[in-house]
């Protein structure tokens, strides 16, 4: 692998990853629409993926790449199951408001 | 020689009847129960014959031991499953299996109409198994196994009519009182193990025989006295005799087999077996004699005024066991064993005969509701008369020979013991014949229609009657001489005349009181009213024990152990822990809001906390 030109420092990648993750957390905590919450989760996963790839590149090791593929596969599976659940929730309750899906309470 | 077959036959009978008896027909139960004991008896005969016992001579002067396997190996202590036969065991084997067989036969008739038929016979067979282990065991621990086993069977059979409160109470009483004795016995076994390094009879008695008698250390006395505590419990001596009269709540064949002929004599057997230890402690031997004499005397006085026919014979058993202990304690071990054997004959006969009377009267046990039965049930009458003359010591019947041996030994030990013994013999003759006269003479005072028992019941009675009459000519002391040297001296003819006169006098007095002029007894009782009510109420010993032992224990258990320790401490701790867990859970429950975003916030907070802690600790390395 040819060395990259001295362009973007590694900290930038990591900062971007942290910002994306923070956005994901914020979206998860503050948005009420289940779809949006779901998207926030995807955002967090991909933020982590970014740091994996960054470290993999920095340390010249392939483990990070493999992990990111794993995460993608899991995310895909999760998307399939999660969307199915959301669909069922909507069918049964006619709402996507996350706080109204709280029948486990009490 | 296959000694193990002797106890195993009844055990197989127990297993078959116990496991399958419910589904078996009655005839099959009879065959299994009686057959197994018969096989055992025949095997005893075969074994003793093979060992040359019946041929006379000096067969079996040393014990014949069979080793099977090592049971316990711990440090230097090595306990094996060994069975042994010597002359003492031979006598016991003959008595246990012989009398046991007769009583099994009798039970077939006596129990014919009772519920739990198979249960009764399986317990009875189990008893035979443990009793044979007890007499065959070649070390203290195996003896103890049999000892506890017969206690268990005694408990089960006393409480055989377990729907009756008094029967289960009597069973509990027997079991609990025996615990006191067994406690002493087990301590004695520990001491033997510590000081001799072995529990094997051969080794222990071999070691002690080589010790000089004069310089016996104190622990030998301790072992002797603790063994005596065990014997006192099992053989119903003062102060632990109280369970035996109550044990009459069990079926009558049980009273005959366990509480007259065999189990209660286990204490006598054990002391005789340990004679080498006792011979090294004259103090313990004196205690044995005094306990025996006191028991013999007091139990006889109680027997004078009982109205329940079985109770009379129960106190008579206690008294006769006391006689055996007098024999042991005065050094005449063979006389004690001799009396054990003759007593097994005539006392089993008395109980079986009483059972036959009770059977004839459909369950009536009160002497005041009997009378005049000699015409209706003549076989029972005549066999019981045989037992009566035997126990009263009328020559030449069996009780005369053995009692004479004991009294002679007592006289040579201390003359006052002889005189107390004679007085006891007088009372024995009186109360036995009082019971017999009340039962068979005079007018019939009950409402039932007496009927003679079937042959399966009077057959054993007849055999036992023959043994009671002639059993005195089996010269047990001579047979046991290699183990227990005969006492020197003897031969004072007047001793015999006095004791025979006492026996005949007792019979004559009973005849005068209860046949010739029946009013006399009542006026006598009225004249000495205080004394009469004292012995009628058995010296209030049960009440005394109740007030001093039973009640404090029960009350202490109720108030202190139950309400204090159990409810306060143990329940309090358990409930307190549960209560605390509920409280904590009630607080933690608030965290479970049910909103997904709440949980997510907790997770984020947790993650931040962990990262912060790692950062504070100096970062991950």
Image (spheres, coloured by chain):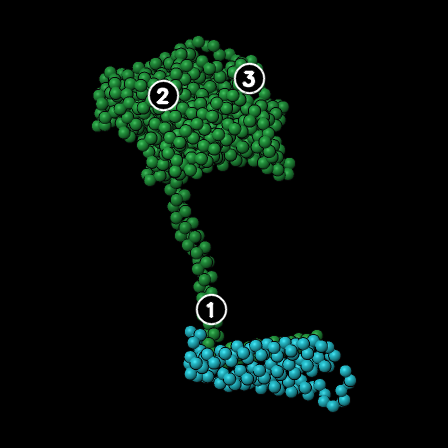
Chain colours: A cyan, B green
Along the viewing direction, whichever of B72 and B449 lies nearer the viewer: B449
Along the viewing direction, whichever of B99 and B614 lies nearer the viewer: B99
Which residue is drawn at the image coordinates 43% and 49% (left, top)? B561
Whether marks 1 and 2 lie on the same chain = yes
Q: Is B450 drawn above or below residue A41 in the view shown? A: above
Say which mark, if any, is on residue B585. Answer: 1
Looking at the rendered structure, the secondary structure element under dot 2 is helix
Residue holding disc 3 = B52
State whether residue B254 appears in this view. no
Which of the 4 quarters of the picture holds residue A64? bottom right
| Label 1 – label 2 distance at C-alpha | 77 Å
Q: Chain of mark 2?
A: B
Q: Chain of mark 1?
A: B
The answer to whether residue B200 is left or right of residue B177 is: right
Mark 2 Cα shell of 10 Å, populated few (<14), some (14-19), many (≥20): some
Along the viewing direction, whichever of B163 and B210 lies nearer the viewer: B163
Say which mark, if any, is on residue B459. Answer: 2
Percent coordinates x, y for residue B506 in the rendering: 33, 17
Mark 3 Cα shell of 10 Å, populated few (<14), some (14-19), many (≥20): some
Percent coordinates x, y for residue B378 in the rendering: 29, 18
Along the viewing direction, whichever of B546 and B171 lies nearer the viewer: B171
Percent coordinates x, y for residue B49 in the rendering: 53, 18
Percent coordinates x, y for residue B452 in the rendering: 28, 22
Please name which of the two marks, 1 or 2, marks the residue nearer to the observer.
Answer: 2
| Label 3 – label 2 distance at C-alpha | 30 Å
The answer to whether residue B76 is left or right of residue B330 is: right
Please name which of the two marks, 1 or 3, marks the residue nearer to the observer.
Answer: 3
Whether marks 1 and 3 lie on the same chain = yes
Q: Is B559 drawn above or below residue B384 in the view shown? A: below
């Amino acid at each position: 692998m040819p060395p990259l030109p001295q362009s973007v420092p590694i900290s930038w990648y990591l900062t971007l990853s942290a910002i994306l993750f923070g956005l994901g957390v914020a979206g998860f905590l503050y948005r009420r629409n289940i779809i949006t919450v779901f998207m926030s989760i995807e955002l967090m996963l991909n933020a982590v993926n970014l740091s994996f790839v960054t470290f993999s590149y920095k340390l010249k090791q392939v483990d990070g790449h493999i992990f990111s593929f794993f995460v993608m596969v899991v995310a895909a599976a999760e998307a399939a199951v999660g969307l199915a659940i959301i669909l069922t929730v909507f069918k049964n309750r006619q709402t996507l408001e996350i706080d109204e899906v709280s029948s486990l309470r009490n | 020689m296959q000694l193990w077959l002797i106890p195993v036959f009844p055990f197989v009978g127990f297993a078959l009847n116990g496991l399958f008896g419910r589904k078996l027909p009655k005839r099959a139960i009879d065959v299994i129960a009686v057959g197994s004991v018969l096989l055992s008896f025949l095997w005893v005969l075969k074994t003793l014959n093979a060992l040359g016992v019946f041929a006379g001579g000096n067969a079996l002067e040393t014990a014949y031991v069979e080793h099977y396997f090592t049971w316990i190996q711990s440090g230097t202590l090595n306990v094996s499953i060994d069975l042994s036969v010597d002359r003492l065991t031979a006598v016991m084997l003959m008595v246990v299996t012989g009398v046991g067989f007769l009583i099994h036969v009798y039970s077939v008739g006596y129990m014919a109409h009772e519920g739990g038929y198979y249960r009764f016979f399986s317990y009875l067979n189990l008893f035979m198994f443990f009793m044979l282990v007890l007499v065959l065991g070649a070390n203290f621990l195996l003896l103890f196994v049999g000892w506890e086993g017969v206690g268990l069977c005694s408990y089960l059979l006393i409480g055989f009519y377990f729907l009756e409160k008094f029967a289960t109470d009597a069973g509990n009483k027997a079991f609990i009182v025996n615990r006191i004795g067994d406690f002493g016995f087990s301590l004695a076994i520990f001491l033997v193990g510590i000081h001799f390094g072995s529990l094997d009879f051969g080794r222990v008695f071999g070691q002690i025989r080589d010790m000089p008698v004069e310089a016996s250390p104190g622990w030998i006395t301790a072992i002797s006295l603790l063994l005596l505590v065990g014997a006192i419990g099992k053989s119903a001596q003062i102060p632990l005799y109280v369970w035996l009269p109550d044990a009459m709540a069990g079926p009558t064949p049980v009273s005959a087999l366990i509480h007259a002929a065999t189990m209660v004599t286990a204490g006598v057997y054990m002391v005789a077996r340990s004679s080498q230890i006792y011979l090294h402690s004259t103090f313990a031997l004196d205690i044995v004699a005094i306990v025996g004499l006191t028991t013999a005397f007091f139990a006889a006085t109680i027997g004078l005024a009982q109205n329940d026919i079985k109770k009379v014979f129960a106190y008579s058993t206690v008294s006769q066991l006391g006689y055996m202990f007098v024999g042991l304690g005065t050094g005449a071990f063979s006389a004690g064993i001799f009396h054990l054997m003759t007593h097994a004959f005539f006392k089993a006969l008395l109980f079986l005969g009483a059972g036959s009377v009770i059977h004839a009267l459909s369950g009536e046990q009160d002497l005041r509701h009997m009378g005049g039965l000699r015409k209706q049930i003549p076989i029972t009458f005549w066999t019981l008369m045989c037992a009566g003359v035997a126990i009263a010591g009328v020559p030449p019947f069996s009780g005369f020979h053995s009692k004479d041996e004991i009294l002679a030994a007592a006289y040579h030990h201390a003359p006052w013991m002889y005189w107390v013994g004679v007085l006891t013999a007088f009372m024995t003759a009186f109360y036995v014949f009082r019971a017999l006269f009340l039962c068979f003479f005079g007018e019939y005072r009950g409402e039932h229609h007496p009927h003679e028992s079937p042959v399966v019941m009077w057959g054993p009675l007849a055999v036992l009657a023959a043994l009671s009459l002639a059993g005195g000519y089996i010269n047990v002391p001579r047979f046991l001489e290699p183990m227990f040297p005969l006492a020197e001296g003897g031969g004072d003819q007047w001793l015999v005349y006095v004791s025979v006169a006492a026996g005949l006098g007792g019979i004559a007095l009973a005849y005068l009181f209860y046949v010739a002029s029946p009013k006399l007894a009542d006026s006598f009782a009225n004249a000495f009213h205080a004394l009469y009510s004292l012995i009628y109420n058995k010296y209030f010993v049960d009440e005394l024990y109740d007030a001093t032992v039973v009640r404090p224990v029960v009350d202490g258990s109720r108030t202190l152990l139950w309400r204090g320790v159990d409810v306060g401490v143990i329940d309090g701790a358990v409930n307190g822990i549960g209560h605390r867990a509920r409280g904590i859970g009630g607080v933690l429950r608030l965290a479970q809001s049910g909103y997904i975003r709440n949980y997510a916030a907790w997770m984020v907070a947790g993650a931040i906390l962990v990262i912060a802690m790692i950062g504070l600790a100096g970062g991950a390395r």
